[in-house]
Amino acid sequence: MDDISEGVFVDQEQRLTAVLADGTRYRIYRSIVEQPGDEVTVADVAGQFGLHPNVARMHLGKLEQAGLLATSLRRGPTGGRPARLYRLSDKVASLIMPPRRYDLLAELALKALAESADLERVAAVCRESGAEAARVSIAEHPEYRNVDREGLVSAILEVGEVVGMLPEVSWHDSILAIDVRNCVFKELSAGQPELVCVMHHAFLEGFIEQFADSGSAAAVEAFSSISRGDDRCRLQFVFG
């Protein structure tokens, strides 16, 4: 990477850090990330966070300027000034300082895998990586060992929160449903959606089976995907 590109990248990361350093602004952004398919107005944010509309507009404007939110206009049925709608953009915030270009490394690795690798082998490696991540987490948190159904939900929620997936987790009879509301691989999956989703799903499969201490979980079933334009990834695990 040349000096100019490196400087531009550092400036972008510094701007994101400054924008999200404000506690109220971070909570606003977080609330929008948690509902990625929704659009909000200044009035919505002002009411939710107890802010004056001008303050809410300022926070939303700074998030938009940073590229974290996108906007559109909605005209009312009686005309008048259109309302500005704010929604989550496709930009993923990375707040590691100094910045590390792991995204570039991941992009190159995915291109190499897409050209030469066997998807089943890739999935097997990712499944074992997920199981190993679960074993590490269990070693650090003994309360996760041999959890019941509700304990499994709590463990997935806590770990998913740490890695940024912001999941919703629930049981429906013998089916464990997970809605990933924030795809941490969104930018990569846009270029290699099939490969990235296979890797992500296999990782989660190994992770969850290890937590459940059971080999009875079926292969993960995907019913929606952010990489295909859905507002969330919905995954289901069927237990025997």
Image: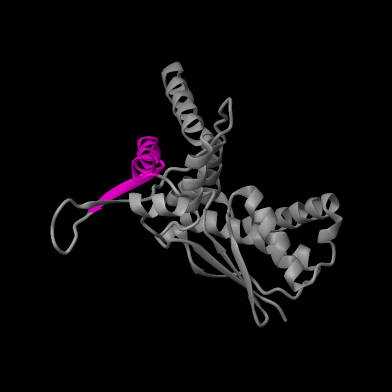
> Does residue 63 belong to the magenta stretch?
yes
> Does residue 138 belong to the magenta stretch?
no
Q: Give how far across and how far down residue 95 sits, in percent.
A: 55, 34
Image quadrant where one finds the C terminus = bottom right
Task: Report the residue at 73% width, 60% height from top.
Answer: 155
Decide: is 114 above or below 64: below
Q: Nearer the viewer, residue 157 or 52?
A: 52
Q: Give how far across and how far down residue 232 sits, in percent.
A: 48, 61
Task: Report the residue at 39% width, 59% height from top.
Answer: 38
Point out the stretch of residues depicted in magenta: 52-73
Decide: is 116 above or below 96: below
Residue 61 occupies which quadrant of the picture?
Answer: top left
Q: Is residue 57 left or right of residue 136?
A: left
Q: Give how far across and how far down residue 224 sits, in percent.
A: 47, 67
Residue with the most extreme left position: 79
Q: Is residue 124 left or right of residue 77?
A: right
Residue with the most extreme top position: 3
Decide: is 1 above or below 87: above
Q: Is residue 221 left or right of residue 205?
A: left
Residue 74 occupies which quadrant of the picture?
Answer: bottom left
Q: Is residue 146 left or right of residue 170?
A: right
Task: Report the residue at 62% width, 67% height from top.
Answer: 169
Inspect this view and state whether residue 207 appears. no
Q: Give how far across and how far down residue 62 sits, in percent.
A: 38, 36
Q: Nearer the viewer, residue 195 or 223?
A: 223
